[in-house]
Image (cartoon, rainbow, N blue to C red):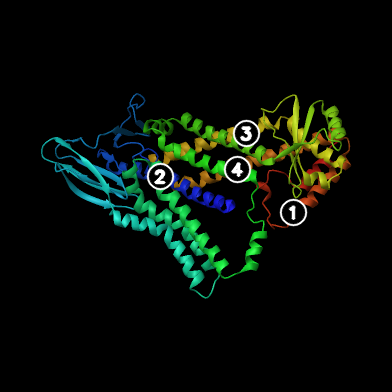
Amino acid sequence: MKKRMLIFLLVTAFFTVSVIMVELSIRSAVLSPFILLDSKKNVGVQKLLTGYSIYQGDYLLDIENTEEDSTNRPLAFHIGPIDYQFTKVNTENIILPAGEELTVMTRRGVKPSFSKEVTIQSSKRKFFFNEYTIRAAKNDGSFSIQLKTEFSKTLTFLIYGCSFLLPFLLALFINKVLPWRNLFTLFVPFILAGILPLILNYHFSMGYALLLTKSYIWSILLCIFLPTFLSVSLTTAIYQWTIKSDEDIEGESEMEESDFLEFSKREKVIIFVLTIGSLAYFFSFFLFPLSLYVKIVDKWYLFAAWYLSLTLIIMLVYTVIHRFMGNYENVGFTEQFYSLKKTIEAACSINVNLFTKKESENETNAWVYSTPFASKKSINIYMTEGLIKKFTLDEVKAVLFHEIGHIKRKHGRWILFITFGVATLISLLMFFTRKIMLGFGWGQYILIFPVGIIALIGLTEWLPNKISKMFEHQADEFAVRQLGNKELYIQTLMKLERISEKENDEFDFKRKEWKETHPSFQKRINFIKDLE
């Protein structure tokens, strides 16, 4: 039961984060290219952004062609000669000079009601937005805007209920009425269980929830997270109920004995914490004021700092989680490894702590956390039980020397430097690509998009992996020097290769070598043979 609930949580969290990303990239007054590019078509015509940006307030967007520096003006930034200015407004008292026009923009699901001082010239319904062009009366004055739901409450609640009940009813119909079952009828209800709450509630219910709660966080939880969770849960429950009602004992027992998606207690804790932490992180974006968004997208160094902070968070979370999930046991002082530990310490002139990962008989690996924060007085080396079981002590010693080589050659510092260097280059590429898109339009952006993709692949895949392969050769060389037995080290690598091929055959999945972080075993063996 806990395993199923964890899977439901992961599914709902995925769709919730997807909606948050859409909200930030499509509807944000500062981040949305749709709003900013569309506003350039009628430079000089002010655009009132309201209803869809409740978490940031209601703002008047004014675009001018100017070379004036916007540094000293709040809520303003430059892209080329274009000056984007935001002014916070009170929708109860908006000043509009006589005869002038104003574009009022709301999200779908929210519609404005104007006072009698203005007339509606035109209105447009788009998938994400509603746009109204209004004109002021003959005399200067002010007017007010009241925001209302675009759809009736009856329709809103009907769609809300259907969003999680329809997949459930479809699964019930397929399992109890239709005389046949196949992969199509099996997976369609589950696919709809995730997609229907997302599409229907995002379009029809979110506007009502925003006006009701005045909070994007509560709106997304109520309209996306909750119905998706209910939809997936109910759809799964109906399949389990029909299986039991058909008394399919054999199939049920097979499911119970299967290790498919079996999580340990530590893994469940980590998945739960990661899911909640990710939701909290993305929800925090709705708490940032618009002024902070303006500064980040206007200054390259602030954008790069934000991206680097995210990179640092990911690195720290990965390291902490990896250590926690390992469930390690210190075996350095046991009878089996004490003499090996002393031999390695004498050869490398450093204290060594040996740890084994519990419940890892099917894994064959050893590793170190080679970060610059590691202690200079001792090294922690981690091994799997599969490595200890399948290799002799001399072969294990060869593997451990390789891991110490990573520490002695200070690969952790280089990895950190390269990671942050690549992250900085990616952030600058993203920053200036966005500037080009907003400055020149979608046409030029589409032309440079393939170039940007190639550059990103090079920065995130090829370059780090190329350097990682070089580090592996350096660690191999260090291990051979310390071991003093080239033949033993080659024998160990060949044994690792045979075990690795046997394990990979289960999945029949071959990655291209340029995507790998390690050289092939054959290249490593050839490199060692060439050492003098």
The mark that comes first in sequence, 4 or 3, is 4
Residue placed most toward the observer, 428 or 27: 27
The residues tagged by marks 4 and 1 sit, at their Cα atoms, a distance apart of: 28 Å
For badge 3, the amino acid type reads: Ile
Label pair 4/1, CB-CB below 8 angstroms: no
For badge 2, the amino acid type reads: Glu
Label pair 4/3, CB-CB below 8 angstroms: no
- Residue bearing the label numbered 1: 503
- Residue bearing the label numbered 3: 418
Q: How crowded is mark 3: few (under 14 residues within 10 Å), some or many (20 or more)?
A: some
Could you tell me if residue 530 is visible in this image? no
Residue 59: x and y, percent? 30, 36
- Residue bearing the label numbered 4: 269
- Of badges 4 and 1, the one in the foreground is 4
The mark that comes first in sequence, 1 or 2, is 2
Q: Is residue 43 above or below residue 16?
A: above
Could you tell me if residue 166 is visible in this image? yes
The residues tagged by marks 4 and 3 sit, at their Cα atoms, a distance apart of: 31 Å
The residues tagged by marks 2 and 4 sit, at their Cα atoms, a distance apart of: 29 Å
Residue 186: x and y, percent? 53, 66
Q: In this view, does 101 lie to the left or right of 65?
A: left
For badge 4, the amino acid type reads: Val
Give the quadrant of residue 489: top right
Label pair 3/1, CB-CB below 8 angstroms: no
- Residue bearing the label numbered 2: 23
Q: Is residue 365 left or right of residue 452?
A: right
The residues tagged by marks 1 and 2 sit, at their Cα atoms, a distance apart of: 43 Å
The residue located at (88%, 42%) in the rendering is 487
Residue 91: x and y, percent? 24, 37
Q: In which quarter of the image is the N terminus?
A: bottom right
